[in-house]
Image: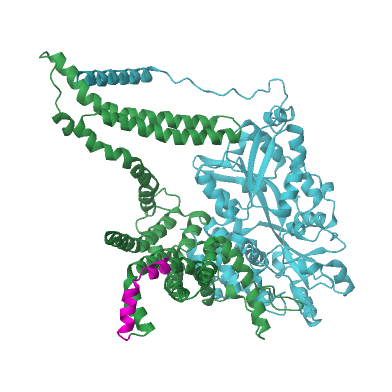
Amino acid sequence: MSVAQANKPTPTGNSAIGKIISWFGTTLGQVLVSIFVPAFTFVVLWQGYMFLQRANAPQIVQVIVAIVWGVGGVALLYLVTNWLVMKLPKRLSRVLQPFVFVGPAVAIMAWFLAIPVLRSLVASFRNNLGTEWVGLENYKYAFTDPRMLETFRNNLLWLVFGTAFSVGLGLLIATLADRTKAEVLYKSIIFTPMAISFVGAGVIWKFIYTYKGTGVGIQEIGLLNAVVTGLGGTPQPWLNLPPWNNFFLIIIMIWLQTGYAMVILSSAIKGVPSELLEAARIDGANETRAFFSIVVPYIKGTLLTVTTTIVIFSLKTFDIVRVMTGGNNGTNVIANEFYLQSFTYTDAGKASAIAIVLLLLVTPVIINNVRQFNQSRRGF
Amino acid sequence: MQKKRVFWSALAIMLIAAMVLGACQTTTPTAEEPTGGENVAALPQGQELANAYAGMYTGKVVTMAGPFTDQDEVVFNDSIKGFEEKTGIDIQYTGSKEFEANINIRLDGGDRPDIVDYPQPGLLRYAVEKGYAIDMNTLINPDWIKQNYSQAWQDLGTMTGPNGDIVAGIWARANGKSFVFYPKKAFDEAGYKVPETWDEMMALTEQIAADGDTPWCIGIESGAATGWTMTDWLEDVMLRVAGPEAYDKWVAGELKFDSPEVNEALDYIEAIWFNDAYVYGGRAAIPTINFGDAPKPMFENPPKCWFNRQGNFVTTFFPEEAVAGVDYSFFYLPPIKEEWGKPVLGAGDIYAVFNDRPEVRAVIQYFSTGESLKVWVEQGGAILTHNDASLDWYVDPVTRGVAETIRNATTFRFDGSDMMPAAVGAGTFWKYMTDYVSGSITRQEALQQIDASWPK
């Protein structure tokens, strides 16, 4: 506002009316218009959607109109706003123009991310239906209930073993594949599971772990039990064996995530200058020494980024557990408990508290990741 | 500069003028025409059903969601086909194995199916408390509801919403759960006799095991609802060990899970379930076998297991070629303590409505008649709650026997887990019973966990 006022118009006359008109025309008018025109455009676009929702057209027509309306509408909103801002005095327009570009993204971020987080935070202090304040009751549950303690333990297992093995194996394979002729082939094989969704992987591995029981005329159809009985062992209900069933689930994540770690790390390893490695070898370093003293420090940034990404994955683990065991038999994880509380037990309060706890757990990792990313960006 | 100011002034004046005009404009009411039907005489269920039969809603779509899938879904679609053909209303039913988990998401998210088939009144209570469910008395002629449902069913369908008590739903199928199915032909050939008491049943169990067979087929896997078969067993045995009054207290949360009564009931169950010689696949296989697959080994020749305690709806999972009364039959799960008589545990499907449109009214009015599920009854697997349903519809002797057993029961109790709060009845009760059966936790841990999860 002060910027607008500082930009005084040339006076047209000395009469009071002229002044008012002049003020009206420039300052207030501009502010009003810059707020209302985009808002009006937005309302028109919104009404278009509402109309579309009520319209009884065939679905395909509705979809096409919606796409055209949506894409065109966003363009229109941008054009109108930009045109208005360009009409404003130069100083003002320079200040405002970035917001025309960033504004929508920020608004959408706020709408879809910031507001839901705040709402969850509020809901976490309220009861199961969100009708009364209950103080810290939900957090007491989230941190002390045996169910939650079980999920914390399991998530810790996922975090430690899932991440360690995914990154470790990824690094090992990337290093070894780097020295073979059929590198592409090996890497493709390891990378393929990456393309499978967690749910799909869960279904596949369910066949591997299937257990049919023991008794007259019962045949095992599970791959793992076939291997075990083939070697003379007795079949096991793999997914019902706490705490080992957690590891059987973690193996699935390792199977899926090793490929990701491998691909990223492989490209980082290729970036290690060969002069450095040669110098190390001339100085008498063996391969192990060269690997840990040259390669690993050189790719440290990438290693950290990959690790933090997989750490976040393991903290958020949900799909595999949901599909394979539903969280039964001591395999429950935080995200699944959140899901159960929210959608099965209809306790919005506890679910929100758990979601906030999960958010708090992931936040430091994300901050670290962003910081790492910024550092590596500066390096280029 | 002069030009620019003129532009702004003009724009501002136009804007203000537009706002003034907008404020003056009165909102034209978009009242929809009340559904016609001046020419069509109302049916006892309501005006809209008569309109529907007069073809006034041809081409309209009514969406429906529910938990039954596979064979049940086919039979349901068969049973509504006639109505769809007569009225031209398209009832689009979507069954989901994750029904219990995602129906509340759909309701909260505003994606409300017109009609929802709830297998559990406990789950419906949430929708009622949130104010989503529409009072049936406004959708169907209240007199018809009173006439066509017994007081017990009406009471079970009445729930407290934000604006007081409403008839939250109407009952469709009922089922009895206190039944043990067995392969009749092989059973008779082997010279076994139907047990009348629990002790006789256990003696027979031991005899079958001694003959080198596995007596019981038990499986409790059911996707997101894994464990409910176990909770049914516990409820059934509770009725036989502790009696209906203790059962009611237990369901209401007044009697703890970790109580002598529940523990005694579990003793009886453990004697069967945790004996690897008595259960097909052994105790460890129980949580991995689907409840619908569990009875299948019964129909192999010779049978690989002999008893399957389940609700009467399980017959839809039996092989198609199996003939009721010849290949299989059932006996009533015998009483344990004489003083509690012959209690029957049962359950039912309740339909709730979430969108009020004329064609939805027509469909729900239709569902309030026994006629709506006649085909399902004739195909087996359904027992109706409607008073206007005739006993002659039950074509196979097994279902008729089930219907008779329910009628002859000295005590009828509704499935407890369906009556408990959803957090317990559709949650911890299932989960911890599953963990307990698989051996992940001890019985006491399971019972204490369930007690702790009861909403305060």
Horizontal and vertical percent for residue B20? 33, 18
The chain assigned the colour green in the figure is: A
Q: Which of B454 and B230 is in front in this view?
A: B230
Chain B image colour? cyan
A265 sits left or right of B246 in the view = left
Which span of residues is magenta-colored? A264-284
Quadrant of residue B141 within the rendered picture: top right
- The residue sitting at 22% across, 20% down in the picture is B5
B295 sits left or right of B122 in the view = right
Magenta-drawn stretch, dominant element (helix, strand or loop): helix
Horizontal and vertical percent for residue B88? 72, 33
Horizontal and vertical percent for residue B147? 71, 38
B188 sits left or right of B24 in the view = right
Q: Nearer the viewer, residue B263 or A15?
A: A15
Q: Does the magenta stretch include residue A152?
A: no
- The residue sitting at 81% across, 45% down in the picture is B390
